[in-house]
Amino acid sequence: MSKVFGFTGGDDFCPGGSIYPNPKESSIFLSLGHHVDVYFPTRKRSRISAPFVFSGEWFEQKQKTSIGALPDECLFEIFRRLPGSQERSACALVSKHWLMLLSNICKAEICSNKSTEHENEVNEKEVDDQKFGGDGYLSRSLEGKKATDIRLAAIAVGTACRGGLGKLSIRGNSSDRGVTDIGLKAISHGCPSLKALSLWNVSTISDDGLVEIANGCHQLEKLDLCGCRTISDKALIAIAKNCPNLTELSIDSCPRIGNEGLQAVGQWCSNLRSVSINDCASVGDQGIANLFSSTSFVLSKVKLQALTISDRSLAVIGHYGIAVTDLVLSCLPNVSERGFWVMGNGQGLQKLKSLTIASCRGVTDIGLEAVGKGCPNLKQFNLRKCAFLSDNGLVSFSKAALSLESLQLEECHRITQFGFFGVLFNCGAKLKALALLSCFGIKDLNLGLPPVSPCNSLRSLTVRNSPGFGNASLALLGKLCPQIQHVELSGLEGVTDVGILPLIENCEAGLIKVNLSGCVNLTDSVVLSMADLHHWTLEVLNLDGCKRITDASLKAIAGNCPLLSDLDVSKCAVSDAGVAAMACANQLNLQILSLSGCSLVSDKSLPALRKLGRTLLGLNIQHCNAISSSSVDMLVELLWRCDILS
């Protein structure tokens, strides 16, 4: 044994000899596939397979002794005296046993000559910086069956000599061979540079695993826990106490994490910038209050979803959220009108710029008006599935929110045409984007336009799947919003040319992106008007499902729209003649073309599509039954730069 520890690299050691006397033991060698994290240096083949001892006229072959016969304590002492991380990585390739031993060696336990160690570290760091950009550059992701302790151990040992592990993501694992606390322990020992850890649906990890991460990875900045039902406040408290640099925390569907863990985060993590808590039954008002009161000067992004918190939590947010710029409140059944009113009147959300409220029954006219007054710098507001909000509340909010630039309403069925246009009348000169999604309370009414100045700031208009929005509303919009550039009017089956044409004709700035998918009653007149009036600005045009659009539209586009890069005429009445017309246009530079479901496009379009392929990056010819499989194969071969869906 003394000879083993006294080895200095002399002639009495043969590097090429097998450490296993029995060749049948090859099954114990580690096999991790083609891509492994351990380092394996190349070696020359040994000239002698075994040492010989000369005695007189005879050669006596000595029996080989395997180093694997040594107890783990001796192997541990040998491994921690290896000169560098590359040598340790090479040893990890020998067997799973050696790999697990090496993965349990902490950096503080590595013993070597100080001068040599310092020189090696400097040289390795210079190489790592040049190759990988510095410590903690590498990122690893394990999913499903690939998520095992062996792979985590290989990552822990192998990344040490290749830049250091900075980000680790584990999503799901098998119940029999999945990641356990042993794997996280290996990461904590070998990857002190870890800055981001994500654990999704990993049921085999307990608090002990995260405690190991907390003890070994003090540089941790981002922690994402989703579906980890065995992790409790104990682990979160350990992270909070040992990882002061934590800036982002996301907890989703972790029922054992509650108020105690959030209190520790608020107390110890003074750099926390972002927090997201979703569907955690143990989180209540006390945890939210402790978190916000302790991090009021730094916490800027907050998402609270599917929690049992009450009006008290919203009152705390309204008072202590002085640094909050982005706030999401979703599915909070115990929050009432009073909670939103108190939050708005707390005067603490002065820096709030983006607010999303979804599925909250407490959103009423009174509460929303208070929020508008209490958030003077609010620029983006998304409101979804708020059944008790009416036109009066929306108009009052628009009058109070003077900085509002973007407003999106989704499934707010009590909002009518009066509320929609009331926003345009009252939002002043800053509103740039307005979206109305699946709002069934909208009914097309012939309203007289009051004597107000046009909304010249509006650039983007989206009306999707709101069947009551018709020609009268569009004609009014055309007069009120002359600077619109991005228009999406999808799923409006009642809209015809009579409503769309005034909007197109009154756009002074020039249309850039237009989506009219699902407007089945539109004709070629709409496209001809756009090609004539907006040919120098139009870049994207979606006519999917406009079954009355024919080759006339394609010919107008080919001759007038040189900037058009994305065209979708799926399920339209276009034919080979229209495709040929586009191919003959010298100024057309299409990059994306969709002809899906165009039954009149056949094999005759093959030469035209080949010509268009000089600029195409994407082509969709799915459900074009008149195009044969042989033509498709030829297109795939000819248009090698283009992604083809067939």
Image (cartoon, rainbow, N blue to C red):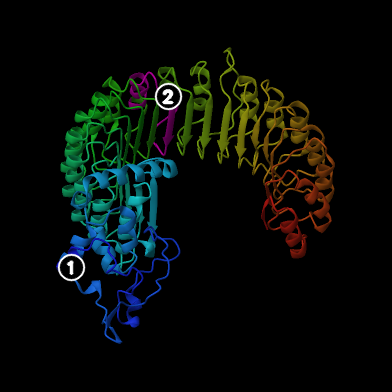
Q: Nearer the viewer, residue 154 or 89?
A: 89
> Residue 321, image x and y in percent?
27, 26
Q: Is residue 378 magenta?
A: yes
Using the numbered discs, state the Cα–Cα distance from disc 2 to disc 1 in whole angstroms: 90 Å
> Residue 412, image x and y in percent?
45, 36
The magenta stretch is 367-394
- Earlier-in-chain disc, 2 versus 1: 1
Q: Is residue 347 left or right of residue 545?
A: left
Q: Residue at x 30, y 29 (%)?
A: 340
Label 1 is placed on what type of residue? Lys
User: Which residue bears the numbered disc 2?
Assistant: 392
User: Which residue bears the numbered disc 1?
Assistant: 3
- Secondary element at image label 2: helix
Where residue 3 sits, quadrant-wise, is bottom left
For the question of whether residue 223 can be seen, the reply is no
Q: Is residue 435 left or right of residue 174?
A: right
> Residue 508, image x and y in percent?
68, 20
For the question of whether residue 281 can be seen, the reply is yes
